[in-house]
Amino acid sequence: MEYNPIYLDIVWVLFATALVFLMQAGFAMLEAGATRAKNAANIIMKNVMDVSIGSLVFWMVGFGFMFGANKSGWIGTSNFFLSDIDPATDSGMFDFAFFIFQTVFAATAATIISGAVSERTKFAAYLIYTVAVTAFIYPIFGSWVWGGGWLSELGDNGFMDFAGSTVVHSVGGWAALAGAIVVGPRLGKYTAGKSPVAIPGHSITLAALGVFILWFGWFGFNAGSTVSGNTGLIAIIAVTTNLAAAAGGVAALTLSYLLWKRFDASMTLNGVIGGLVAITAGTANMSPAMAALTGLIGGMVVVGAIVLLDRKLKVDDPVGAIAVHGFAGAWGTIAVGLFASATYGGVDGLFFGGGVGQLLVQLTGVAAAFLFVFSTSFIVFKVIDMTIGMRASDEDQIRGLDISEHQAAGYPDFAPAIPLVSYSTPVLSGAAVPSGAAIDETIES
């Protein structure tokens, strides 16, 4: 039997899928560590449901909207429930591998929102939005870029976003911005004079673990987007991915010291992710030096955007998701029009003699993403807020969403950190809450 190269492609795509799937654990640890202990179980539950609901909904309709026949240039109209895939052919088997790879991308876009609206959002409201983002919002914009839609036809080369700085990350970031605005800030986040109050997360160790898992998984995220194991391109992608992450961390560390005279751990961690997000669009189209520069600027963009959102716009984002994914994703997408090199990816950006054409296409795609995703997300969040309500009650925020939403505790051995209230059913298996347990009115750090 003659060897078919598609088999290696299938193996590579499935291996990359496993790496990207592991990123869900990274997001969970990062978000849990960056928020308070009394909400840890709630964070984990949202991440589990992002994958569970996202996988089912993307299989039902999302994949068809994104990659189905797209005659209009705006939305796919076929292959719902994978109905067009022939399992009797090698190409059909590759299509199944491609589908599961795209599924974990969709789940990534959804989970970005989780951290930005954490500690004050009703669990049921979040589940409804997860359906909306994986069924419609992410797939529709994705169809414009990766599904043969109108953005892929702009200019000489189309809108270039190799692995999703905009398609995945800015989509998640702009949706997170809409959600954070609608749900409002956490209790105690701003003083009466509107000055921001620091609410530290409970474990920088967990947050760091999450970042390292994400960094590791990103090699699958970017290099896997070749959807081929028969290309040496995966080597340069691995190099550019790593350099951008490293540069983003160094930039955020340096800028935080220049601004506040401290080597800020949380800013540094977010800088690493910002570098990764930034290079995701151009990872296959830039030299190592330009990738490092893209990540370096990405790390600085993250710090600046966090300050802008927190202090100027009064948008409460406990984990920095909007800055990291929305702002750094936009920057990285624009950077393709500046730093792309034909030597590495077949097209030259502005600084390599390519003129302004590709840069204008990149700017158009970034603007389209913001306008479409923010507006549709804002409408979805507003409708949820006007029906079942987005925001948890003040009482539930004070005692923690672990108790109010799940009757569980992420850290049951540390009662002062997880204030409990009376319930007729056990909070944890075999451990009922004492009757009359008082609500701790303190908002812990």
Image (cartoon, rainbow, N blue to C red):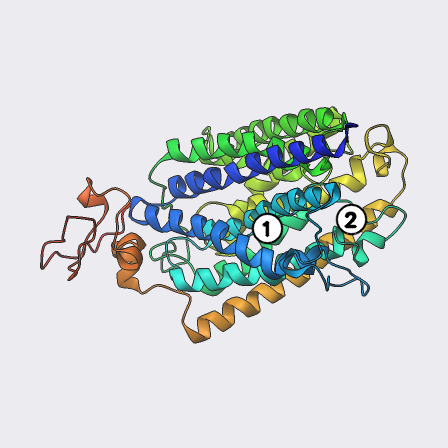
Residue furthest bottom in the image? 387
Residue 143, disc: none
Residue furthest left in the image? 435
Give residue 169's position: percent from left, percent from top: 61, 47
Q: Earlier in the sequence, mark 2 or mark 1?
A: 1
Locate the C terminus by quadrant: top left
Front in this rendered view, residue 326 or 50: 50
Q: Residues within 10 Å of mark 2 (few under 14, many from 20)?
A: many
Look at the numbered disc 2 and give the secondary structure of its residue: helix
Locate the N terminus by quadrant: top right
Looking at the image, is 226 positioned above or below residue 132? above
| Residue 191 shows in the view | yes
> Horizontal placement of 198 versus 417: left or right?
right
> Horizontal placement of 217 versus 360: left or right?
left
Q: Which residue is mark 1?
A: 106
Q: Residues within 10 Å of mark 1 (few under 14, many from 20)?
A: many
* Residue depth check, mark 2 versus mark 1: number of the one nearer the observer: 1
- Amino acid type shown at disc 2: Gln
Q: Residue at x 78, y 61 (%)?
A: 70
Looking at the image, is 329 positioned above or below residue 379? above
> Horizontal placement of 408 versus 304: left or right?
left
Q: CA distance from mark 2 to mark 1?
A: 22 Å
Front in this rendered view, residue 223 or 60: 60
Looking at the image, is 135 positioned above or below residue 238? below
In the rendered structure, are the residues bearing label 2 and label 1 in contact, judged by CB atoms less than 8 Å apart? no
Residue 362, disc: 2
Give residue 341's position: percent from left, percent from top: 83, 32
- Amino acid type shown at disc 1: Ala
Give residue 22's position: percent from left, percent from top: 51, 36
Q: Residue at x 68, y 43 (%)?
A: 93
